[in-house]
Image (cartoon, rainbow, N blue to C red):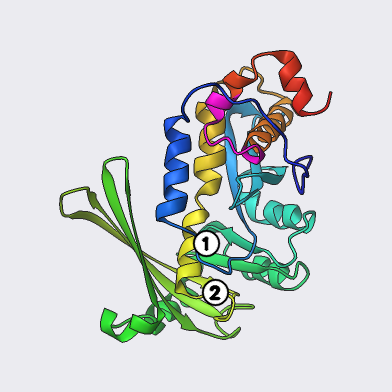
Amino acid sequence: MWCAGRRPYPQIPDTPGPAGREQRRVTRRQITHPAPAGLLPAAAIDGKACRGARTADGGCIFLVGAISHERGVVLGQSQVASKRCEGPAARTLLSQLEVAGMVLTLDALHTTKATARLITGQLNAHYVLILKGNQPLTRAAAHALLSGPDADWTQTTAIDDDSGHHRRERRTIRTVEVTGELFPGARQAFRLRRDVGEIDGPWTSKEIVYGITSLPTDLAGPAHLNHYERAHWTVENRLHWVRDVTFREDHSQVRTGAAPRVLASFRNLVISTMRLADHANIAHARRDLLDHNAAFAVYNI
């Protein structure tokens, strides 16, 4: 893609005046929640349906994409026949990208042995995968390995507290070393607990998920895995949400043929360009480029 490995970064003019609320929030978070040292380059992979758009046979148009954790740049995208085909399509997409040495985070749908073998073998990369109902035996084994009181796991536990949007969140992760017998390429299993509550009130909800990773302990401790799992939501917060809300993708009247996929690719290009230019708020950045000459200048046209 045009933005992958782009140097120098594109420049977009700033609106005169103080930084917007979202830009200030990003800057504040970088100060209060610095990323752990030693993180590897990482990307999140997930699919999105173009609601309202249809293929020639009446099926839903479904796109799977990869986006970098650090800058929120879209690395690639491909169309799949249906939600059921997302796993093979993701493997095909990853095979077309330069991901050697990277950490790839995927949700439970992609927790398959074929995907794990591809990532750790041919692609020479690492995975962080969530264990749910499609891998019941592996999940049960991880549950058994990671059971016990918190006092037994102090050496392999990391806690991250955060607050915002009138709520607070605590993410507690514990890890244990495993072997490839548990899952292809596996080196660690983890248990992640998420507690959510009001800013000044009690905790109101709790969720516990289990996962598996090919990262060894010398490359990723509990704090690193906690960060990778949280950063996986980049694909929802910084891509899917922006395309739906800022660009109103699901309300597009272009619904047939290759046009929905092509327009989604252009939206990805715009989002990635603005991310590379360090704009946190895409809506604000779009208003900075209302002049066509300024927009074309970003791409040296």
Left or right of 212 on screen, residue 4: right
Outermost residue on the left side: it is 201
In the rendered structure, which segment of residues is drawn in magenta?
275-285
**Residue 194: image location, x then y, percent:** 33, 60
Determine whether 151 is above or below 203 in the image: below
Determine whether 181 is above or below 40 in the image: below
Image quadrant containing the N terminus: top right
Name the residue tied to disc 1: 228
Image quadrant containing the C terminus: top right
> Of label 1 and label 2, which has the lower sequence position?
2
Mark 1 touches mark 2? (CB < 8 Å): yes
Residue 220 got which mark?
A: 2
Amino acid type of the residue that numbered disc 2 sits on in the rendered structure = Ala
The quarter of the displayed image where residue 213 is located: bottom right
Instruction: Give the alpha-carbon distance from disc 1 to disc 2, as whole Å.
Output: 10 Å
Outermost residue on the front side: it is 17
| Residue beneath the point at 41% across and 80% down | 156
**Residue 146: image location, x then y, percent:** 38, 80
Dot 1 surroundings within 10 Å: few (below 14), some, or many (20 or more)?
many
| Residue beneath the point at 54% across and 67% down | 37
Instruction: Note whether residue 149 is visible.
Output: no
Dot 2 surroundings within 10 Å: few (below 14), some, or many (20 or more)?
many
The quarter of the displayed image where residue 153 is located: bottom left
Residue 35 among magenta residues: no
Amino acid type of the residue that numbered disc 1 sits on in the rendered structure = Tyr
Dot 1 falls on a residue whose secondary structure is: helix
**Residue 190: image location, x then y, percent:** 45, 74
